[in-house]
Amino acid sequence: MLECLRRIPPFIYVLILTVFGVVGANLYLAFRANSTERDLVRDDYYEAGLLHDQVVNAERQADSVGLNLEWVISNSGWNAIIQSSEDSLLSDLDHQITRCEAFIYRPSDRKLDRSISFSAQISEQKGKRVWNAPLPKLMPGYWHVTLRWFTGNRLLLEKNFKHHATG
């Protein structure tokens, strides 16, 4: 029996080990793909779909009224500054807005997601409103930030952007 194994060329052993290595790597990757929770899968996809129209309308309204968003990070915290060329329009919206929230989303880890409430600040400049929130600790990297302005529980305006935290 051992004499039979001695007659097998060495490249056959390498070929067999390569096949086992490829099969093992594929099994490992299949296991990792099935055990990793992905952000694309939602339990509440139907409810999220129903709210999608409201979000699209809020984004369109923010664009149609000509609001410009400026995102400033200072020692006092985050400032969301909205400006409009028409002060009367911003004043009308200001009376409707009851609260501002930011949803901070980390695509790589849902455990780091959070919501932050902003408080309104008085601005001396005409056509400008400032919303302030305490500065949260964020891991370095890119974060998706969604700012939402509400009137009661109804979404009024929404702006999305990416924020790069430097640690």
Image (cartoon, rainbow, N blue to C red):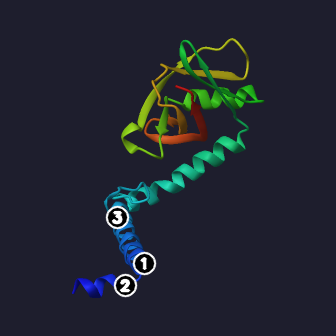
Name the mark on residue 28.
3
Circle nearer the viewer, 3 or 1: 1
Q: Which of marks 3 and 1 is nearer the N terminus?
A: 1
In the figure, is residue 154 to the left or right of 123? left
In the figure, is residue 103 to the left or right of 6? right
Q: Where is residue 136 in the image (x, y as percent from the top left)?
A: 46, 24
**Amino acid type, mark 1:** Leu
Q: Earlier in the sequence, mark 2 or mark 3?
A: 2
Please tell me how crowded label 1 is: few (under 14), some (14-19), or many (20+) other residues with Cα within 10 Å. Answer: few
Front residue (pair 57, 167)? 167
Does dot 1 land on a helix, a strand or a loop? helix
Front residue (pair 40, 63)? 40
Name the mark on residue 15.
1
Please tell me how crowded label 2 is: few (under 14), some (14-19), or many (20+) other residues with Cα within 10 Å. Answer: few
**Amino acid type, mark 2:** Ile
| Marks 2 and 1, how far apart at CA | 12 Å
For disc 2, the marked residue is 8
The residue depicted at 37 percent of the width and 84 percent of the height is 8
Q: Earlier in the sequence, mark 2 or mark 1?
A: 2
Q: Residue furthest right?
A: 85
Does dot 2 land on a helix, a strand or a loop? loop
Does dot 3 land on a helix, a strand or a loop? helix
**Amino acid type, mark 3:** Tyr
Q: Where is residue 148 in the image (x, y as percent from the top left)?
A: 53, 37
The residue depicted at 58 percent of the width and 40 percent of the height is 157
Front residue (pair 107, 73)? 107
